[in-house]
Image (spheres, rainbow, N blue to C red):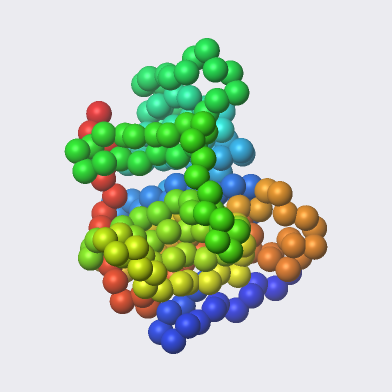
Amino acid sequence: MQKSAPLTMSSIKIECVLRENCRCGESPVWEEASNSLLFVDIPAKKVCRWDSLSKRVQQVTVDAPVSSVALRQGGGYVATVGTKFCALNWEDQSAVALATVDKDKKNNRFNDGKVDPAGRYFAANRRSIYKLEKEEQIPDGMCIDADGKLWVACYNGGRVIHLDPETGKRLQTLKLPVVKTTSCCFGGKDYSEMYVTCARDGMDPKDLLQQPEAGGIFKITGLGVKGIPPYPYAG
């Protein structure tokens, strides 16, 4: 199948840089030291690392759905796997549990996770769900730029919206050629590029034909803003 041409909006360019076919891609994190993008495929139980220079993808498969990944201050990575916080060793493909929650709740799992400026890894479970009814979009993963403004991926909305968190005003809307956009982060040189993950689970064959890049990784350039480096887990 032919790769579709990049979408352009004035100076903004949106292109699929990786046709990974993620069932549910999430938690994009830029690793400056290796010029790589980390992300997870939740139901496929995979943590992935895409080298933006070589264009190669490496994967670590874990034993439960993996909802987020983060950098670790001392090197390596941490991830939320099922209801466990795990340390990932990329070299030997292992995941070692650092802590486990909700051991008595079999069907529960973490849904997302982020590291705060103090180096603490926060994760939320699946028992709290917030839905934005307007235009049938669900606000999902988000990131912040150097100006303190929010960028929010809208699941089932096929877009990333740029918001002023102080006024609530929508500043910009970036439309992507896939509907199930899940999360976003800044990366690349000077953190001037945006990377967006998306999903393909739940799409029927007709939708998949119309959206062949569903489950891929998208890069957006020309935004005119820069992000901030991700905070590493201090443990």
The reply to whether residue 84 is visible in this rendering is yes
Give x and y (percent) for residue 184: 43, 57
Quarter assignment of residue 171: bottom left
Quarter assignment of residue 116: top left
Give x and y (percent) for residue 38: 43, 48
Of residues 68 and 112, which is closer to you in this image? 112
Of residues 229 and 9, which is closer to you in this image? 9
Quarter assignment of residue 52: bottom left
Of residues 172 and 80, which is closer to you in this image? 172
Give x and y (percent) for residue 164: 31, 65
Give the quadrant of the C terminus: top left
Give x and y (percent) for residue 69: 41, 40
Give the quadrant of the N terminus: bottom right
Q: Up-down: is 86 above or below 218?
A: above
Residue at the extreme left: 118
Q: Up-down: is 181 above or below 90?
A: below
**Residue at horizontal 65 percent and vertical 72 percent from the top:** 3
The reply to whether residue 53 is visible in this rendering is no
The image shows a total of numbered marks equal to: 0
**Residue at horizontal 38 percent and vertical 61 percent from the top:** 151
Residue at the extreme bottom: 10
Of residues 12 and 17, which is closer to you in this image? 12
Q: Up-down: is 124 above or below 151?
A: above
Residue 206 appears left or right of 107: right
**Residue at horizontal 34 percent and vertical 63 percent from the top:** 168
**Residue at horizontal 33 percent and vertical 51 percent from the top:** 31
